[in-house]
C-alpha cells in the first residue's frame, strides 16, 4: 500500500511538472500585445498655456491593443474650434521624436497616390473655422517606393520595437528586455507645428494668440500581460 501511494505521488508530481511546462511554453508562444497611450492631458495643458484651449483640439484614433511592430502610422484629427481663426498645419516642419534613440524624424502626411519624391516640400493644410482635419501620418524613413505601383508605401513599423532586440547597442537590447518584462515603458511624441492667423490678416485684435506654435503630442507604449493576446480579448 505504501509503495502504491509513493508511486501515485511520483506520478502526480510528474503530471504537475508536465502541465506547468506545457502551460509555460504555451504562454511563451503567444504573440506579445502592446498598447499605445496618447497623453491628452499634457497636450491640453500646452494649449491652455498658449491660450488656445478654446480654439484647437487634437485627438488620435488608436486601437485598444496592437501586436509588436503592427502600428505603421498615426491617425490624427486636428479641430479648429474657433469662429474666426485660420489654422494651418505646417507638415514639413512637424517631426516624430523617439525618446530612447533621441531621433527626430521628418513627418510625411500620407495620401493614396503618394508618387512624388519624398524630398519635395509638403504644402501646409488649412483648417477653416469650426472644421476638423483628419490625416494619416508616418515618419519619412518608413516609406519605400513600390516598383509595381510606383507609389510610396509604408513597409516598416512607426516605432520599430523588435529592432531593439538585435541592436548592436547593448543599452537598447537591455531596454527591449525590460520592455518585454513590463519593467519599462517606451515613449515618443509627434511634434505638430501649427500656424494661426485671423481670416483677413494678422492676429485677432485684442487677443493674445501666437502666430505659430509647436504642440508636443506625447505617447507611451506599454507591454500588456500575456492574456491580452487570447482570442476573447481581441477587442480589449
Image (spheres, rainbow, N blue to C red):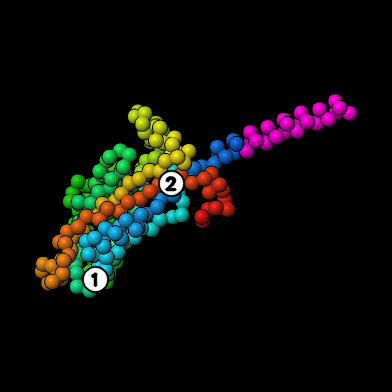
Counting from the top left corner in percent of width and height, residue 77 is at 32, 61
Residue 63's disc is none
Q: Secondary structure at mark 1?
A: loop
**Location of mark 2 (residue):** 222
Classify residue 146 as left or right of residue 20.
left
Assign the N terminus to one quadrant of the image: top right
**Location of mark 1 (residue):** 82
Q: Residue furthest top?
A: 3
Tell me what residue is drawn at x 58 percent, y 53 percent: 232
Q: Is residue 19 magenta?
A: yes
* Residue closest to the eye, 171 or 71: 171
Please state the extent of the stretch shown in magenta in the rendering: 1-23
User: Disc 2 versus disc 1: distance between alpha carbons?
Assistant: 35 Å
Q: Secondary structure at mark 2?
A: strand
Residue 5 picture quarter = top right
* Residue closest to the eye, 141 or 8: 8
Q: Residue furthest bottom?
A: 83
* Residue closest to the eye, 18 or 231: 18
Q: Residue furthest right?
A: 1
Amino acid at each position: 500500500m505504501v509503495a502504491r501511494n509513493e508511486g501515485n505521488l511520483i506520478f502526480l508530481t510528474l503530471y504537475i511538472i508536465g502541465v506547468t511546462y506545457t502551460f509555460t511554453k504555451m504562454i511563451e508562444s503567444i504573440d506579445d500585445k502592446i498598447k499605445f497611450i496618447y497623453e491628452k492631458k499634457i497636450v491640453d495643458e500646452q494649449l491652455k498655456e498658449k491660450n488656445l484651449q478654446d480654439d484647437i483640439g487634437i485627438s488620435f484614433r488608436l486601437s485598444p491593443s496592437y501586436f509588436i511592430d503592427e502600428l505603421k502610422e498615426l491617425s490624427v484629427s486636428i479641430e479648429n474650434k474657433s469662429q474666426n481663426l485660420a489654422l494651418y498645419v505646417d507638415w514639413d516642419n512637424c517631426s516624430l521624436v523617439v525618446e530612447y534613440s533621441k531621433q527626430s524624424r521628418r513627418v510625411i502626411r500620407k495620401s493614396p497616390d503618394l508618387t512624388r519624391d519624398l524630398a519635395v516640400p509638403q504644402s501646409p493644410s488649412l483648417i477653416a473655422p469650426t472644421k476638423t482635419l483628419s490625416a494619416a501620418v508616418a515618419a519619412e524613413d518608413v516609406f519605400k517606393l513600390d516598383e509595381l505601383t510606383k507609389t510610396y508605401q509604408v513597409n516598416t513599423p512607426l516605432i520599430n520595437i523588435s529592432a531593439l532586440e538585435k541592436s548592436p547597442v547593448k543599452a537598447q537590447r537591455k531596454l527591449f528586455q525590460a520592455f518585454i518584462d513590463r519593467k519599462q515603458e517606451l515613449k515618443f511624441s509627434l511634434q505638430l507645428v501649427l500656424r494661426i492667423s485671423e481670416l483677413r490678416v494678422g492676429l485677432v485684435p485684442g487677443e493674445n494668440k501666437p502666430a505659430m506654435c509647436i504642440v508636443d503630442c506625447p505617447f507611451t507604449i506599454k507591454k500588456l500581460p500575456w492574456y491580452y493576446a487570447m482570442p476573447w480579448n481581441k477587442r480589449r
